[in-house]
């Protein structure tokens, strides 16, 4: 951590809370996107429209994915994780090097 502090003292000391809040916001948006996607795959299971059911094919897929190390995922599955990582990296780049071209 001390190496990082020496290299990026402004981010870690002066703007730590701001960066923390921005990351928390990003994590919440990522979670919200995932939850919306999850619900889009669910089926309503009663006449009033209350409750959701995850179809077995999706439950099986997500169970397999959550039990699979990243290195063993398909390239398509890795691309989905890479897209989320790119969102975090974009926020970190802006925090470390504000205004720099990407």
Image (spheres, helix red, strand yellow):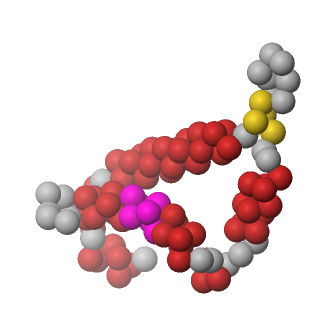
Quadrant that contains the N terminus: bottom left
Quadrant that contains the C terminus: bottom left
Residue at left 78%, top 56%? 57
Nearer to me, 29 or 12: 29
Asked if residue 16 lies in the magenta stretch, the reply is no
Nearer to me, 100 or 58: 58
Q: Is residue 14 left or right of residue 30?
A: left
Q: Position of residue 20 (x, y in %)?
A: 42, 52
Magenta segment boundaries in residue numbering: 82-88
Asked if residue 83 lies in the magenta stretch, the reply is yes
Residue at left 52%, top 66%? 81
Q: Is residue 31 left or right of residue 66?
A: left
Nearer to me, 44 or 1: 44
Q: Identify whether 30 is placed above or below 74.
A: above
Q: Main secondary structure of the magenta part?
A: helix
Q: Identify whether 40 is placed above or below 9.
A: above
Q: Position of residue 36 (x, y in %)?
A: 59, 39
Residue at left 68%, top 44%? 41
Q: Is residue 16 visible?
A: no
Q: Position of residue 70 (x, y in %)?
A: 61, 77
């Amino acid at each position: 951590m001390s190496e990082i502090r020496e290299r990026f003292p402004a981010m870690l000391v002066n703007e730590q809370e701001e960066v923390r809040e921005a990351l928390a916001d990003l994590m919440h948006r990522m979670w919200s996107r995932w939850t919306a996607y999850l619900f889009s795959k669910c089926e309503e299971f009663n006449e009033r429209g209350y409750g959701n059911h995850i179809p077995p094919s999706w439950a099986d897929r997500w169970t397999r994915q959550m039990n699979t190390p990243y290195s063993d995922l398909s390239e398509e599955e890795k691309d989905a994780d890479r897209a989320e990582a790119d969102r975090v990296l974009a926020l970190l780049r802006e925090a470390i090097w504000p205004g720099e071209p990407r």
